[in-house]
Amino acid sequence: MAHFNGRFIDRIVVLTGAGISAESGIPTFRDAAGLWEQHDPMDIATPGAFRRDPALVYRFYNARRANLAGVAPNSAHLALARLQQEFAGEVFLVTQNVDDLHERGGSRQVCHMHGQLGAMLCNSCQSTMQAPEAFDALSACPACGGVGSLRPDVVWFGEIPYFMDEIALQLGNCDLFIAIGTSGLVYPAAGFVQRARQRGATTVEVNIEPSEVTGLFDYQRQGPATVAVTALVAELLGQ
Ligand code: OAD
């Protein structure tokens, strides 16, 4: 348990977005060199796009998965893992990121609301399994043997994010909500701050610049995640 700006804190919910992985070398979506500057998300990240041009969608996610091998978690991922291990209360980590840098940074509980690059889903038998580095329409499902039924296990626009019931429960119970490196443009995640406020939680935004929903937060910690998250975690751990 801790005090934050004079308030007693027992339960923390942390939401992360692409900004936390930016300094590890994974491009964000909406910054100047971001992924959605190079591709229209409607051509890549919707069920309709996958039906229209599956080869393009497989290529995009295979390339992003391959890119993961060359990057490493940064000090912000490590700091959050330390918070989860050392904080006397509870810390629930929910990420919009499909990379595995929280896990590689030492986090044992990570709720991937937008799925994971490292997983694939069979549209035929509905199994979810670990993905090889690359797969496409010619790959057979290891579970049912069906060919052409595998897709990346990521949540696309128009699909419902994973674990929404669990996330709602956690937001309805937290004393402190921290959003890190997320633009506040994509719902439902952009609405989590409001849910936490309704519950009476203190809210903190960590971002290199103000997000779309910055005005809804009680406190802003502006700066690169590696610096700002590390400082915030040290403060919460009383170090
Ligand atoms: P965005 O690319 O929309 O936003 C990244 C945020 O990180 C911005 O607010 C930046 O200011 C901030 N940022 C960049 N570098 C940073 C740094 N070093 N330290 C701190 N903050 C930094 O990414 P998300 O908000 O994660 O969904 O995007 C949300 C969802 O939109 C993604 O999960 C994805 C995307 O379309 C799907 O694909 C369904």
Image (tube, rainbow, N blue to C red):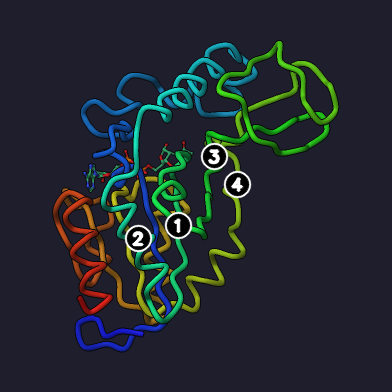
- Rendering quadrant holding ligand 1: top left
State left or right for residue 53 relative to residue 106.
right
Viewport quadrant of the N terminus: bottom left
Residue bearing mark 2: 80
Q: Amino acid at mark 3?
A: Gln
> Where is residue 175 drawn, in percent x and y?
38, 80
Structural crowding at the residue carrying mark 4, measured as other residues with C-alpha within 10 Å and reported as few (<14), some (14–19) or many (≥20): few
In the drawing, does residue 81 fall left or right of residue 51? left
Q: Alpha carbon of mark 3 to alpha carbon of mark 4: how far?
A: 14 Å
User: Residue shown at 35%/64% (left/top)?
Assistant: 82
Q: Which residue is mark 1?
A: 107
Packing grade of label 1 (10 A; few <14, some 14-19, many >=20) is many
Instruction: Report which residue position mark 3 lands on.
Output: 116
Ligand 1 is within 8 Å of the C-beta of the residue at disc 2? no
Q: Is residue 142 left or right of residue 79?
A: right
Q: Earlier in the sequence, mark 1 or mark 4?
A: 1
Which one is closest to the eye, mark 1 or mark 4?
A: 1
Amino acid type, mark 1:
Ser
- Label 1 within 8 A of ligand 1 by Cβ: no
> 171 or 99, which is in the foreground?
99
For marks 1 and 2, give the CA distance.
Answer: 7 Å
Mark 3 or mark 4, earlier in chain: 3
**For numbered disc 3, what is the local secondary structure?**
strand
Q: Amino acid at mark 4?
A: Ile
Q: Residue at x 27, y 65 (%)?
A: 216
Of mark 1 and mark 2, the one earlier in the sequence is: 2
Q: Nearer the viewer, mark 1 or mark 3?
A: 1
Judge depth for marks 2 and 4 and give the one in front.
Answer: 2
